[in-house]
Every structure is written in structure tokens, then in C-alpha cells.
Image (tube, grey):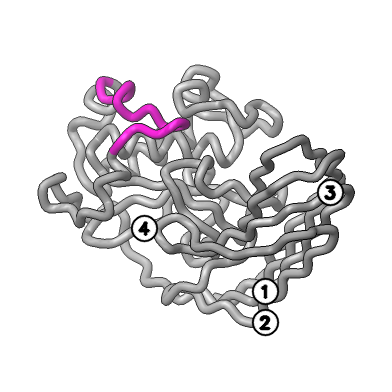
Amino acid sequence: MVLQIHASLEYDLPTTTDLVLQVEAAHLPEQVVSNAVLDLAGHSHFARGPGEDGIGERVILRAAGRLSATYAATVAIERQLADLEALEALPPHLLPAETIGFLFDSPYCPASRFRAVVAAEFGHLGGGAQVAAMRDFVARTIAYVPGSSDGRTTALDTYLARAGVCRDFAHLLVTLARAAEIPARFASVYALGVEPQDFHAVAEVFLGGAWHLVDATGMAEAAGIAKIGVGRDATDVAFLTSFGPVTMVSQSVSVTRG
């Protein structure tokens, strides 16, 4: 599947501020990026650095006044799709070393506090069947309500409030999977079918010796997702991180099939 991606951001910065921007689709074997253009205006410093796990890139900026960013690209999705429920989980001692960190608690994903919930609700299942049941549980019990959460909302907050947005759905699924000793990470993505269209967030779980995308909102399929970056949680892959005051003026995202 080929995706046409366009994103536009504009911010007001009352003082000179350092920022990290991560909005470009990652160059990966599973997704071929072409015709990519990132236009920036209003910055006085520009540098690039690798994203978490070497997936994607961060753009490091210093800017003041009005900052605008426009990104466009064509992404051909070529990932191998698997039957999630048929995938097996590896015990921790057989996991690749680089996946171990995705079993631990992180700021938005307090997995250790969900072990009893996972044992009670999903303990009779294992591997991909267990993750599929967790995905369905999140979709069934959490209402998608724009504005119901903010940048401080954790997976535990979402579980108790029973409402959230894509970021919260992803955090909760990541947390449940980690509580079951399945490595899970947060993925910032562009995705076909998301309504309202915006930057999207999904979980990625390590099963059957590979990473697999899982969207608990049910809006996107792995075949129509382009990864921007991955991390322990949203802390690592925010599309904009500011080290000073910033006000959003406008933001738009378009993902179409092409």
C-alpha cells in the first residue's frame, strides 16, 4: 500500500526556545519513503539526531517568534503481516537483549501495577492471543473522547477514567502487554483511516521474534501505518517537545491512499 502524507504545524514562541521535532516517516525496510520534503521557517539552529532504537530522526531546533514546519512524503508500506493470535511469546530469558527494556515501567506505563489485572483478566491466554484479548478489552472498555486527557495522563489514569485518545489507548495496551512479560513499545505513526485525522499512536509488541503493530482504537491496520518513531512511551516520540513556552497556532495532518 502507498500512502501520501502531508503535515503542517505552526507555533508561536514568546522567547527564544529550544525544541525537538519528530514528524518524518522513518526510513525502514518495511516502509520505503520517497519524495520526502521537510520545510522549516523561523529557526536559528538546525541539527539532526537518531530517534529511539535508531528508528526515525529527531530534528533539534532553536527558534523565536513564529515557527512553521511542513512535511510531505510518499511511503510504500511493505511490511510482512502476521496473524496476531497465532504468534508465540518468548520467555524473558530468551528475548533479544534490546527488547528487555520494553518490559519495564516507564513514566506513562506503570506495568507493575497491572500484574494482578492481567492475571485475572488474561491469565488463561498467552502470546498473541493474549495481546489480542487485551486489545479488544481496551477497545471495549475505553471510550474515545477527544479532550478527555492531557500530557500528564498515564495508563492508570486512563484505566480508571475509562476514556482517552489514541495516545492513551496505546499507553494502556503497552502497559498490559508489559505486565504479561511481553515487550511492548509506543509507536508514533501516520495512519490511514484515522478520524479525526491527526498524528496517531499505536502499540508495538514483540512476538514470534519480531515487532508487530497493534491499534487498540481499531481505526488503523498495520498495512496502512507509517512509523515515525518508537519509544518507551509518548515521552520518547512526541512530535514536538519544547524546552520553553509555546502556543500552537495551527496543525493539520493528511494521510491518503495513493
Tell which of 83 and 43 is nearer to you.
43
Instruction: Give the secondary structure at mark 2.
Output: strand
Q: How far apart are marks 1 and 2 (CA)?
A: 5 Å
Residue 60 on the magenta segment: no
Q: Nearer the viewer, mark 4 or mark 1?
A: 1
Residue 166 occupies which quadrant of the picture?
Answer: top right
Please tell me whether residue 124 is drawn above or below residue 198 in the rendered image: above
Q: Quadrant of the N terminus?
A: bottom right
Instruction: Give the secondary structure at mark 3.
Output: strand
**Residue 17 x %, y %:** 75, 44
Instruction: List the residue tagged with mark 2.
Output: 35
Q: Give the range drawn in magenta.
A: 104-116
Residue at the image point whose x is 68% and y is 49% from the top: 19
Residue 253 occupies which quadrant of the picture?
Answer: bottom right
Instruction: Give the secondary structure at mark 1.
Output: strand
Q: Distance between the residues labelled 2 and 3?
A: 29 Å
Residue at the image point whose x is 32% and y is 64% from the top: 82
Residue at the image point whose x is 43% and y is 63% from the top: 54
Q: Earlier in the sequence, mark 4 or mark 1?
A: 1
Q: Earlier in the sequence, mark 2 or mark 3?
A: 2
Instruction: List the residue tagged with mark 1.
Output: 73
Instruction: List the residue tagged with mark 4.
Output: 212
Q: Nearer the viewer, mark 2 or mark 4?
A: 2
Q: What residue type is labelled 4?
A: His
**Residue 206 x %, y %:** 29, 53
- Disc 1 and disc 2 in contact, CB within 8 angstroms: yes
Count of numbered marks: 4
- The crowd level at tag 2 (other Cα within 10 Å; few <14, some 14-19, many 20+) is few
Which residue is most to the left? 93
Instruction: List the residue tagged with mark 3.
Output: 64
